[in-house]
């Protein structure tokens, strides 16, 4: 949503955000511009059940596919369930700056209830607004989530 003053002009912050979003689209087609921005994404998501049934490890590869870097500390939310109704397992934050084209892998452990061998669904949200720390100026928000489903423990009897 774009904000306007009473005189009908676009608010300064809204102009800046709009300029970044327009340039992000243009940059993909034509040129690198003055108002480049990062674009954080979940580039990969996997689950390790090697410690089942005591723990499951969720592994998320967080990437910056934009044209500007981001500082360390980007919040990443790990959830059990399906979006948007999952149960928050915890937040991790990136520990390094992510320049364009770089990524970092983060981990979160899920402890199943006793006797529960699954299946479980998980999802991850990078730049998670639920953490209250979202980077508002990003090229796209539609690639900030990844999910994996039907993870379960294999029980040999």
Image: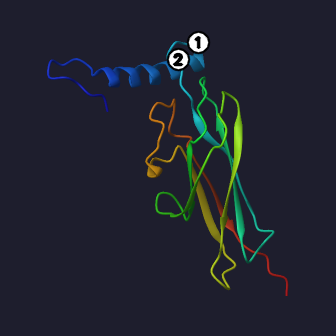
Callouts 2 and 1 close, C-beta under 8 Å? yes
- Residue 117 is situated, as x and y percent measured from the top left of the image, at 70, 79
Image coords of residue 53 (percent x, y): 74, 77
Q: Quadrant of residue 14?
A: top left
Seen at 46% across and 30% down, the residue is 137
Position of residue 104 relative to residue 51, above or below, is: above
Q: Residue at x 27, y 22 (%)?
A: 11
Q: Nearer the viewer, residue 85 or 131?
A: 131
For the rendered model, the colour scheme is: rainbow
**In front of the other: 140 or 74:** 74
Q: Is residue 47 above or below residue 92?
A: below
Quarter where residue 59 is shown: bottom right
Q: Is residue 130 left or right of residue 68?
A: left
**Crowding near the residue tagged with mark 1, few <14, some 14–19, many ≥20 C-alpha atoms within 10 Å:** few
Name the residue rendered at 59%, 17% in the picture.
29
Q: Quadrant of the N terminus?
A: top left
The spot of residue 114 in percent (x, y) is: 66, 84
Q: For the C terminus, give its image quadrant.
A: bottom right
Q: Which residue is mark 2?
A: 26
- Judged from the image, the secondary structure of the residue bearing numbered disc 2 is helix
**Residue 83 on image: x %, y %:** 50, 57
Q: Which mark is residue 4?
A: none
The numbered disc on residue 30 is: 1
Query: Going 52% across and 40% down the picture, which residue do you hit?
Result: 142
How far apart in space, not on screen, are marks 2 and 1 (Cα)?
6 Å
List the single residue furthest toward the bottom: 157
Instruction: In the rendered view, tell whether residue 87 sits above or below residue 71.
Output: below
How many other residues sit within 10 Å of disc 2, few (<14), some (14-19) or many (≥20)?
some
- Say if 66 sits above or below 84 in the image: above
The secondary element bearing badge 1 is classed as loop
């Amino acid at each position: 949503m774009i904000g306007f003053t009473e005189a009908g002009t676009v608010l300064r912050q809204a102009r800046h955000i709009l300029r970044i979003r327009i340039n992000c689209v243009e940059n993909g087609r034509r040129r690198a511009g003055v108002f480049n921005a990062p674009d954080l994404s979940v580039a990969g998501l996997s689950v390790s059940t090697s410690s089942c049934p005591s723990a499951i490890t969720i592994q998320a590869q967080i990437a910056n596919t934009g044209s500007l870097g981001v500082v360390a500390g980007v919040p990443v939310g790990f959830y059990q369930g399906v979006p948007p109704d999952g149960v928050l397992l915890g937040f991790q934050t990136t520990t390094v700056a992510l320049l364009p084209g770089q990524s970092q892998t983060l981990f979160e452990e899920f402890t199943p209830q006793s006797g529960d061998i699954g299946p479980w669904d998980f999802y991850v949200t990078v730049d998670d607004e639920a953490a209250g720390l979202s980077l508002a100026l990003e090229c796209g928000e539609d690639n900030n989530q990844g999910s994996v489903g039907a993870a379960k423990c294999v029980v040999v009897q």
